[in-house]
Amino acid sequence: MAEQAAELLWWQRGVIYQIYPRSFVDSNGDGIGDLRGVLQRIDYLSETLGVDAIWLSPFYPSPMKDFGYDVAEYCDVDPIFGTLADFDELLAAAHARGLRVIIDFVPNHTSDQHPWFKESRSSRDNPKRNWYIWADPKPDGSPPNNWLSLFGGSAWEFDAHTGQYYLHSFLKEQPDLNWRNPEVKAAMFEVLRFWLRRGVDGFRVDVAHFLMKDPELRDNPPSAGGLALYKPMGEYDTQIHLYDKGHPDNHALYREFRAVLDEFEPISPRMAVGEIHIADWQEWASYYGEHNDELHMPFNFALINAPWRADVVREVVENVERVLNRGQQPNYVFGNHDEPRIASRIGERAARACMLLLLTLRGTPTMYYGDEIGMVNGDIPPELAQDPWGKNVPGLGLGRDPERTPMQWDSSPNAGFAPAGVRTWLPVNPDYLTRNVAAQLADPRSMLNLTRALLKLRRESPALHSGGYRTLSGDSHVYAFERSAGAQRFMIAINFTAEPRQVALPSGGTLVISTEMDRADERVGEQLSLRPYEAVIVRA
Ligand code: GLC
Ligand code: CA
């Protein structure tokens, strides 16, 4: 059924572009990207590319043990990234161009250097003791239960000074906050208000489903086999994570969280998208809230590690269409700062088809910086490795440095990311000499120009940004669907294979965009031919 475009809000119609600030543009030559760097490229985002919103990964003061996901102060900017004034300037420049700004909210844990944790660990009767999750050792001195850190080893760290363990679902330098303590909740909601008052348009909520855990701290049961929920994670996969995250009390919490955002709704519509890795569709969708009063969206990661196959993708999309009600906005993601680059995972030609898919599905697309030029995984020599996950749990390819290499702007030394001669925090991928924004802008058939054309068509076309969805066909090779609003109708067909394929469409039409950028305006009949890995949009 066609939906009415006028009802949709910016985050429902629009396209989100994720910026990992360390890796976007280094404005001051220290080898690390920063907020003024983003400001320098603001017209690239709003004009050249034409996205609707940017999501900035954390830029808060941090010891950078997890590159900013260990926050030592929620209401400030780390000097590496700039100042609060720089942030305000960036926000104003974005808003002046109609670009929305989503920031990362990291509620599950702070840095162990956060003043709250320093107080908490100072003594058992400190007023902030109960702001974190402390528990007594077992009689034999071992950790309170069997919970594991996602980044390797026990989730408990012993504090000799006070004789108790504290919980850390991630690094030991990232102690988990105790969200069952009303003071923590109040303080964290004030953090939201601090940024909402400054004018941010929304939040990406880090590991949103981790906040509430079993209050009795029961042992997780063993898992029979690999979980295959996400990616093989070593020892972490030996348990069913029944008690250490995903507690039903999360829902009441997110209703309160939502109410904080809603306080600002009369000024302008705000949104929150949660990082939620849950394989069960019903449970995943429950984070929208029974009355759509929790997170505006839980990120949909179902396609991020799914095999590149027409039937698999079709099934995911149909599940989303089936499970969500009318007020629940779908969304799709193919890459972020935690996942291998899509072009490396499925190949460069398929990555073009993937971009076409992402930008034509019904729902909010989130793109990852660099995917618009088809950036591939960086090859990071072990001595230059940065990511603590890869270092703590070696041998499984869990390190996330390859997808965090500097953005490739042009063919000058350091790819236009940082001044020549500067040592960048991660090495620039040597393919920057040919794969860069400037070179691709000059090539009419480049991935960047394909992405720009897709973004432009999506923005101009109610059928694409707000219309209804209908599957046309989908065997294991070709997937075709329709998007429509009123009289406007597009048919999208994607060849997932390395061979030429035919697909039957319900009607002929005019080809608007091919991933090869060479078939515009071609008249096509009901039998459409697709080249290997080609995807097309046909206007009926
Ligand atoms: C999320 C972030 C990841 C971070 C982790 C711990 O998964 O995306 O980068 O390491 O949370 O905060
Ligand atoms: Ca810098």
Image: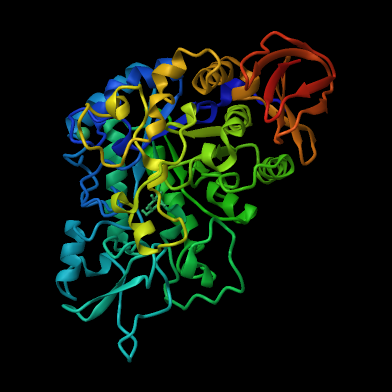
Across and down, in percent, residue 493 comes to 72, 27
Q: Quadrant of residue 532?
A: top right
Across and down, in percent, residue 45 comes to 39, 22
**In screen coordinates, is 220 left or right of 462?**
left
Judge whether 14 appears above or below 317 on screen: above
Judge whether 7 appears above or below 330 on screen: above
Q: Quadrant of residue 529?
A: top right
Q: Is residue 265 visible?
A: no
Residue sitting at 80 percent across and 21 percent down? Answer: 528
Q: Residue pushed farthest bottom?
A: 139
**In screen coordinates, is 280 left or right of 435?**
right
Q: Nearer the viewer, residue 448 or 453?
A: 448
In what quadrant of the picture does the C terminus appear? top right
**In screen coordinates, is 470 left or right of 391?**
right
Judge whether 376 appears above or below 307 on screen: above
Judge whether 249 appears above or below 317 on screen: below
In what quadrant of the picture does the N terminus appear? top right
Q: Nearer the viewer, residue 14 or 33?
A: 33
Residue sitting at 76 percent across and 37 percent down? Answer: 477
Across and down, in percent, residue 3 comes to 66, 26
